[in-house]
Structures are given as structure tokens and as C-alpha cells.
């Protein structure tokens, strides 16, 4: 007599959606468990905006300098979670011995980096938007017509940073270390990406590094779109976004593949107990 399973068979698409929804629910539970931490996280973004506003006022630099620094800082803050969220969660799981529980879901392991960091990526983008909105309320001259394409640029930047995060995650799975590398990259990207100044002030021997960092393309595109004027000596916003889109395709595809290979190698070496 053949046993009949009472559990309905799910399609592959359904498994993917359930996995994404499951990780989002985990993050929402954590947000509800520590509401004060969530509130403080959003309040913290107010202070950099006020800092650059009063600094621009004190120096008599005007609204253009204020919005210039505001956009760079908002982009860096918005991309930070996308860059570090995956490695933070993986390291947390490794330290508590729960990483294997993330890997038993019958979906491709390549889906894990996307599902694991989707909520942090969304909230990071929201933080960037909140900072821009606060700056606008303080008088920053934001061009409203550039907002839709600016959101596209921010989305591409988040995808690019998620892709970079998968490289660090692959390293973390095999060697138990990866977070310091990502944090160091994030700090360096704020400099060579031109968060607070145009890259034209950088020495020639280091300026070329800016073109290898996705932060530069996001920040430059956002400034052109939201300030409504091209930056002298830089590519136009559509060209910047096109380059960023190409980077996303190449980096995300290779990063997902590398992460999947790292998990399989860790399984062969006995690092993972599954």
C-alpha cells in the first residue's frame, strides 16, 4: 500500500516565494522584538543631515554644497546594509551553529543571498530616502523630476552592493572571516566614490580606483538627477546608470555562482554538517 503524503507538493516558483517571505518574516520579527533599536536606527540618520546643513550654513556655502554632501552621504548610508547585511547574518548563524538550518530548504543555494538580505536592502534604501527628504525640508534644492530615475539608480546600487556582499559571503563560509574586509571596502568606497567631494580632487594615482567602485556611479548619477545639472568632467547620468546595470549583471551572476560553489566546497571539506 502506497503512503499518501498530506503535505501538498509545491512548485519551484512557490518554493522561491515562500523562501523570500520566510526570511522577510524573520527580519520583521527581529524588528518587533527590538523596536527601540529600529527607532534609533532611523533617528540616527537625522544627525548627519543636520551636521552638513549647519556646516554649509556656517561656511556660507549655500544650498548647492549642502545638497552635494547630502546626496553622497545618503547613498553611502543606503548602500551600507546591502553591502554588509549578508555577511553579518551569515557570521551570526555560524557563531550560533544555525547556518545549516538555512541550507535545508529545498531551493537552490544561490537563492539564499537574495532572500537573506532582501529586507535589509529595502530598509537601507528607505534610510537614504528619509535623509534626502529631511534635507529637502531643510531647504536642499532637490529636482523632483529626477526622483523616479534616481530611485532606479539607487536600486541598481543596492543590487551591485548585494553582489559584492556575495563575494565576501563566499569567503566567510570557507574561512570564517569576511566582515572586516567588507567594512574596510565600505570605508574606502566612501572616499574614492566621492561621497563628500568630487573625485577630481583625488590624486591621479588613486582616481582611477573610483571607476572600479559602484558607489561612484550611484553617487554621480544621483547628484546629476537630483541637482538637475551635469557634473563637469563626468559622464552623463544615463551612461552612468548603463555602466552600473552592466556591473550588476556581471557581478551578481558571478557572485551567486561563487557563493554556491563555496557552499558545495564547504560541504565536501566537512565545514558544513549537511
Image: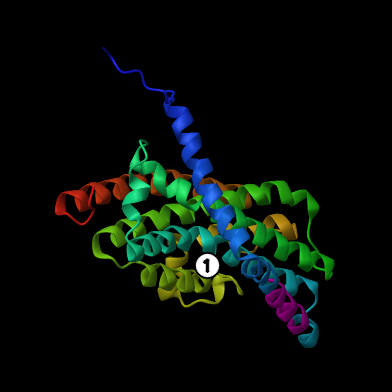
Where residue 25 appears, as percent x and y from the top left, is 55, 48
Magenta span: 45-55
Farthest residue to the top: give it.
1
Q: Residue at horizontal 50%, vertical 44%?
A: 22
Q: Is residue 213 magenta?
A: no
Where residue 112 appears, as percent x and y from the top left, is 40, 46
Farthest residue to the front: give it.
1
Towards the viewer: 90 or 252? 90
Towards the viewer: 115 or 223? 115
Label count reads 1
Q: Residue at horizontal 66%, vertical 61%?
A: 128
Where residue 97 appears, as percent x and y from the top left, is 32, 60
Please, is residue 51 above or below residue 230 in the view?
Answer: below
Where residue 166 appears, as percent x and y from the top left, is 38, 54
Please, is residue 111 above or below residue 83 in the view?
Answer: above
Name the image quarter holding the N terminus.
Answer: top left
Q: Residue at horizontal 59%, vertical 70%?
A: 195
Farthest residue to the bottom: give it.
58
Q: Residue at horizontal 61%, vertical 47%?
A: 238
Q: Is residue 234 visible?
A: no
Q: Which residue is mark 1?
A: 193
Disc 1 crowd, CA 10 A, few/some/many (<14, 14-19, 20+): many
Q: Left or right? Give the position of 166 relative to 83.
A: left
Q: Is residue 46 magenta?
A: yes
Label 1 residue SS = loop
Amino acid at each position: 500500500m502506497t503512503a499518501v503524503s498530506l503535505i501538498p507538493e509545491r512548485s519551484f516558483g512557490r518554493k522561491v516565494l515562500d523562501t523570500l517571505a520566510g526570511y522577510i518574516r524573520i527580519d520583521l520579527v527581529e524588528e518587533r522584538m527590538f523596536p527601540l533599536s529600529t527607532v534609533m536606527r532611523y533617528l540616527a540618520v537625522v544627525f548627519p543631515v543636520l551636521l552638513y546643513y549647519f556646516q554649509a550654513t556656517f561656511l556660507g556655502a549655500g544650498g548647492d554644497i549642502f545638497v552635494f554632501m547630502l546626496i553622497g552621504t545618503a547613498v553611502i548610508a543606503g548602500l551600507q546594509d546591502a553591502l554588509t547585511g549578508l555577511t553579518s547574518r551569515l557570521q551570526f548563524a555560524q557563531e550560533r551553529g544555525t547556518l545549516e538550518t538555512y541550507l535545508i530548504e529545498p531551493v537552490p543555494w544561490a537563492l539564499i543571498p537574495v532572500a537573506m538580505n532582501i529586507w535589509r536592502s529595502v530598509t537601507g534604501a528607505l534610510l537614504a530616502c528619509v535623509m534626502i527628504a529631511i534635507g529637502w525640508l531643510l531647504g536642499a534644492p532637490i529636482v523632483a523630476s529626477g526622483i523616479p530615475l534616481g530611485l532606479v539608480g539607487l536600486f541598481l546600487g543596492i543590487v551591485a552592493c548585494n553582489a559584492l556582499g556575495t563575494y565576501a559571503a563566499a569567503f566567510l563560509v570557507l574561512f570564517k572571516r569576511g566582515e572586516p574586509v567588507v567594512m574596510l571596502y565600505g570605508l574606502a568606497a566612501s572616499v574614492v566614490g566621492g561621497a563628500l567631494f568630487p573625485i577630481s580632487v583625488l590624486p591621479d594615482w588613486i582616481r582611477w580606483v573610483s571607476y572600479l567602485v559602484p558607489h561612484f556611479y550611484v553617487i554621480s548619477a544621483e547628484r546629476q538627477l537630483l541637482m538637475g545639472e551635469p557634473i563637469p568632467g563626468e559622464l552623463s547620468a544615463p551612461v552612468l546608470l548603463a555602466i552600473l546595470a552592466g556591473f550588476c549583471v556581471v557581478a551578481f551572476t558571478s557572485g551567486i555562482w561563487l557563493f554556491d560553489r563555496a557552499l558545495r566546497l564547504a560541504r565536501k571539506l566537512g565545514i558544513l554538517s549537511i
